[in-house]
Amino acid sequence: MNPKNLRIVCFMCNWVFCDEKESPVSQESQILFDANIVRVMCIGRVDPIIILETFEKGADGVLLIGCTPPDCHFIEGNLYAERSVVLLKKLLALAGLDPERLELRWSSPNEETSFDQILTDFAVQMQKVGVSPLSGESPNEQVLLNVLAAKNAAANFRLRVLAGRERELTENTNVYGEKISQEEFNALTDEVVKAEVIRQKIHILTRQKPLSVKDLAAIIQMKPHSVLRHIVDMRRKGMIGLDRVEGTTPLYKALEAQ
Amino acid sequence: MASSVCTQAKRLPPCRTACPAHVNVQGYVSLIQRGKFKEAVELIRKDMPFPAICGRVCFSPCEDACARLNLDQAVAIRALKRIVADIEREQGRVKPEPIPKTRTEKVAIIGAGPAGLAGAYDLAKLGYPVTVFERMLEPGGMMFYAIPSFRLEKFVVANEIAYIKDIGVEIKTGMEFGKDVTLERLRNEGYEAVFISIGTQVSRRMNVPGEDLEGVVRGLKFLRAFSLGQHIDVGEKVAVIGGGNSAIDAARTAKRLGAEKVMVLYRRTRNEMPALPHEVEAAEKEGVAFHFLVSPKRIIGENGKVKAVECLRMRLGEPDSSGRRRPIPISFSEHQYEVDLVIPAIGQIPEGSCVPNEFLDEEAKVALIPVDPVTMKTRIPGVFAGGDIVSGQASIIQAVGAGKQAAVSIHRYLTGQDLKAGREEAEETTWVKDWEILKKKSRRYEAPTEKTRLSFEEAERFLKETKRKAMFEAFRCIGCGPCSECLAGIDLCEEDKAVVDESRCTGCNTCAIVCPVGAIEKNEEEIAQVNEDLCKGCGICAARCPERAIAMKQLTDENILSCALAAIRRGELT
């Protein structure tokens, strides 16, 4: 696999050094692939939705380059980015994309690894992973559905509030003076991430046409009773509604106003 | 998405306000962050022509004002300036094109010290034909003749002055004011404005008996002789009197000239010394002894030569007009130090014969020229004055500031504008108002040490090795000004601001938690409000708002996404 053919998007913090180069793009010759660099104000600025959408649109790999902690022009934007990446890797794994496709690397003038080295390392990593199932003319529909669901999950209040509050909750105490341990928090996020992705999948599928629990279970490849449990929750939240009953089988349809 | 030119800042960061010459500190530090060393020097030169000189000997008021002091240590601004200037010189400075003389009014500047040269530089950039008259054979004033070469190398001074000459300033040396040049003659020769910056030339007398004995060499004379490479017999024991930078320079010079024992006698304590702390430390390391709370009463001679200094012990009383505690002599505390050479360095005064009487206040004791403090205007129309000759002995950067102000005044005078209009102090600002937030959030460098800034040697060691280190040091700048006006066409401008969609905000407070600067507050209706003065446009809140109610004005999510998609398409082409 020639890495030149891979579509790699690199988000880079505005404050990351790249020696005296005007832009790292000008140094292509030494790097295995064309680094398509998108400069952002701080690596913490990159919304998880943007990264998932980049994958959805067919990127083979996404590389984030931020400043090595404890240095960040915005105090701790890089730490927020780090948490986002952990969450994103979970979402990617659930969506059936190799989490290796997403990488967060630190760059600092105090470190030995050069900027070129970071790009080259990622190129090697991407060579192993290969082309994304979403790239090209005919993307894998199952994966596409999964990624769309993951994207919606990342846009959902429940996940975002957890992601935004993670450092506050695990490093400080909440308003009741309780401190949540990192393990507890991880277990909680795992559960929420899994549930949210499934619910978003159900939502996307039922938006196209009304489906029964049995149909859904077949498409998502889950046991019908688990699907039903999510549907009960979703009905309570107003995400989904009863469309009609065919024989004895109720068909559900997504509601837009969540 | 990228804004290539920053907006002009209305307010300035504290470092820039603190600098008498208002050098765009934040601008060049942010250029160094990006590794743009050449552009950094050019940016410094926009404001003043002495990056390498100030990088060595400036007392760096910018570092004292640095907002980073609230967190740990100030950014080593002076060392950074030195590094970029030195790198440029080492790599060979490109000779600048002479600036075309677009104006016809000739301007004369008297005295090629920092004030005169800075004024000449600014006027030449405005297109005036400028001539600088200098009494000594080399231009540079105190930078050349007083500051010893171990602090400020002569070739550094020569290089910076060469730059000023290159852009088209004419420097005539060997022309003494009052003798070879007079105001009348300048007027007759067609000069329409004059800037007098002749500085303070003589060390102040101590007014104690025995001051004219052989073996008493006044500080400036001693330093000048050293600068000129003249032979000076320092003997074995040297006493330097005074606590300013000249005194420390003289002591360190005497040590280098072979004196075995050098002592500095100062009438107050170390805390009241006007000398730069790191210079004092360097002198101590070199073996200079310090005696505090002693003041010379008389100098004892033997066969017309100095034998000893008799001193009185002092104690500190109430603070005086300078805010320092006044030394009070203790009776019957006379004691003697045996010395071969006495160097009094207790301040400088103008050489009386240089200054025409028409300038002076009759009742004033010292022959300083009184001027309007804002416009530098003297009582004679068309004649301006600035630098030490107005303020009394001060620093290079203060002189540069005076020269710049005079250049503005002269330009306005020659174009018939109001001299005073709009010349007020710029507003000082930082984007961090609540340092407690930052302190709580910042878990980077260790707690502040006793020293508030890196000493010269430390900074040198710290920065000299590599450019990367310099970039790293520059990175410590938190960019507390609203916009650095670096005009470098940087990728992203910090003038981006967050906007809250009030209809979507649920008041969950997540944005306020993640905001690095505390720019988000909630109003009475529990809706998040962005304080645009504080917001730096990092967008961390926009990426975390659970309701996606926060957007950025310039670098929106859509912008980032379209860049990313363009990147994917570029990937498809190859």
Image: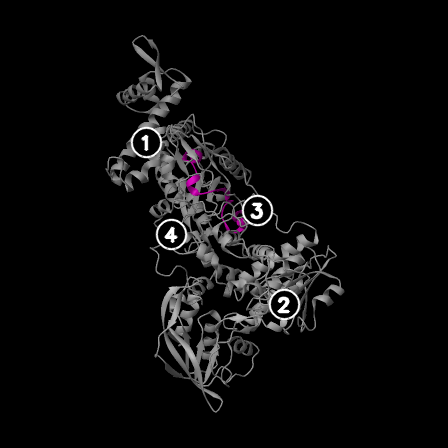
Residue placed under numbered mark 3 in the picture:
B489
In the image, A122 versus A252, the foreground residue is A252
Q: Secondary structure at mark 3?
A: loop
Q: Report the magenta residues as a range.
A: A23-51
The secondary element bearing badge 2 is classed as loop
Q: Circle 2 is placed at which residue position? A: B111
Badge nearest the viewer, 2 or 1: 2
Q: Chain of mark 4?
A: B
Closer mark to the observer between disc 4 and disc 1: 4
In the image, residue A104 lies at what x, y percent?
A: 40, 44
Q: Which residue is mark 1?
A: A193
Image position of B10 (left or right of A165): right
Q: Nearer the viewer, residue B224 or A210?
A: B224
Disc number placed over residue B315 in the picture, else none: none
Horizontally, residue B13 falls left or right of residue A170, namely: right
Q: Is residue B535 above or below residue A253?
A: below
**What amino acid type should be assigned to the residue bearing mark 1?**
Val
Q: Is residue B86 visible?
A: no
The residue that disc 4 covers is: B71
Q: Position of residue B96 (x, y in %)?
A: 65, 60
Distance (Cα) linking label 2 and label 1: 74 Å
